[in-house]
Image (cartoon, helix red, strand yellow):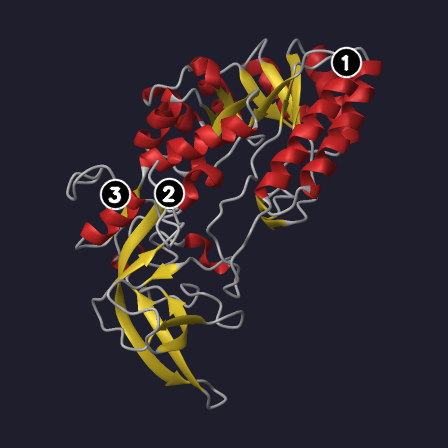
Amino acid sequence: MSAPTADGLSEPLAAALAAATEDRLVYDLAGIEARHDALRRELPVVQVRFAMKACPLDEVLTALARRGAGADAASPGEVEQALRAGIPVGRVHYGNTVKSDRNIAEAYRLGVRTFATDSVQDVAALAEHAPGARVFCRVATGGAGAVWGLSNKFGCPPGDAVRVLEAARDAGLVPAGLSVHVGSQQMTGEAWHAAAEDLGDVLRVLGRRGLRVDHVNLGGGLPALGYRDRRGTPLDPPLDKIFAVIREGMDELRRIHGGPLDFVVEPGRHLVADHGAVRAHVTRLTERRTAGGERQHWLYLSCGKFNGLYEMDALQYRLVFPGHRPDGPYVPAVVAGPTCDSDDAYSHEEGLVPVPATLASGDPVWVLSCGAYATSYTTLGFNGFAPLPLAWADRPEGTGADD
């Protein structure tokens, strides 16, 4: 992988953005592969199952499949896409605890034999529509320390996990594992430490009940590195500490289990966020007065919440303004997308973004570290603003997936 530029971009991604003359979403596949390989070096015995929802592009799935990764699928449609992209069905699991009878039966027909669960009702449905399947029970976490906590919709308390896996065994399923998710963009090592303690408690009870699982799924949550919070302060996740805590937790869980125990992770944004960027352009830099009479600048971009930057309500993306001097005059501005919708903006109550005072309509803008969820959260054309065309850093302009 090429050395990063001063903006943290890989050289291929920076070159592709500089060469683009029209708006597009650009990915650096080599950068994604390098991030995957770095993860495997940190956690060499862990199986990687890419969380497809973070970047459901065939090219990304195929590249990761070549590195040995599998897929964390949440629907039969994702299962089908993973298989088309070359991921062996044995490296695909159905990681969504929410699924209809039809979903289960279709995934089973496609060859999936490992399913997440968190309730006895789901176990009963799995027994009927995926007989003999392997199941892993998701244990709920509090989500503290994460940008997105994910603490309500999924998972069951540790005590209930034992009951769910016993029901799976009694229904003829294989109670194969446990899983957690510490929250998306988790910024602390403590979250994984707490999750390991909960998992250890469950393993102890399972052992006393005569149930021995064969794996623990540590879920997603590994952070991207290039985000800023809503006030514009760079988020600086302690990645080395996080990996150290995960390794310590794995060792402790093996000790508690008292035998071989495999581990799985489901990275999403950690692999792709920093290796995707948008080439957008300035719609308008304006100045208006607030209700209190204060002057306020607004920078409207050609790209916003509904066509690539969905997560702008929780963070700020880094912006680069090519052609404008970093030491030139800057003004604090609210950054917003082009649609006629008030949600299509960074929260101006949180923090303003310094932007060149001389910006003109049509000037290019690079939006960095937006490779996660930029495609999957994009609308089909809200307000008539079409999804961004795709391009790849190692291909000449005009050979993207949508051209």
Q: Residue furthest right?
A: 208
Q: Which residue is mark 2?
A: 275
Seen in the picture, residue 318 relative to 65 is either above or below; the reply is: below
The first of marks 1 and 3 along the sequence is 1
Please tell me which residue is depicted at 24% across the width and 65% down the height of the picture: 323
Q: Which residue is mark 1?
A: 258
Three-letter code, disc 2? His
Asked whether, in this view, residue 360 is left or right of residue 125, the answer is: left
Counting every numbered tag in the picture gives 3
Q: Quadrant of residue 281?
A: bottom left
Q: Which residue is mark 3?
A: 390
How many residues crowd around disc 3 within 10 Å: few (fewer than 14), some, or many (20 or more)? Answer: many
Seen in the picture, residue 221 relative to 41 is either above or below; the reply is: below
Task: Give the percent coordinates (x, y) of residue 396.
Answer: 16, 40
Three-letter code, disc 1? Gly
Q: Nearer the viewer, residue 40 or 80?
A: 40
Task: Give the percent coordinates (x, y) of residue 173.
Answer: 64, 11
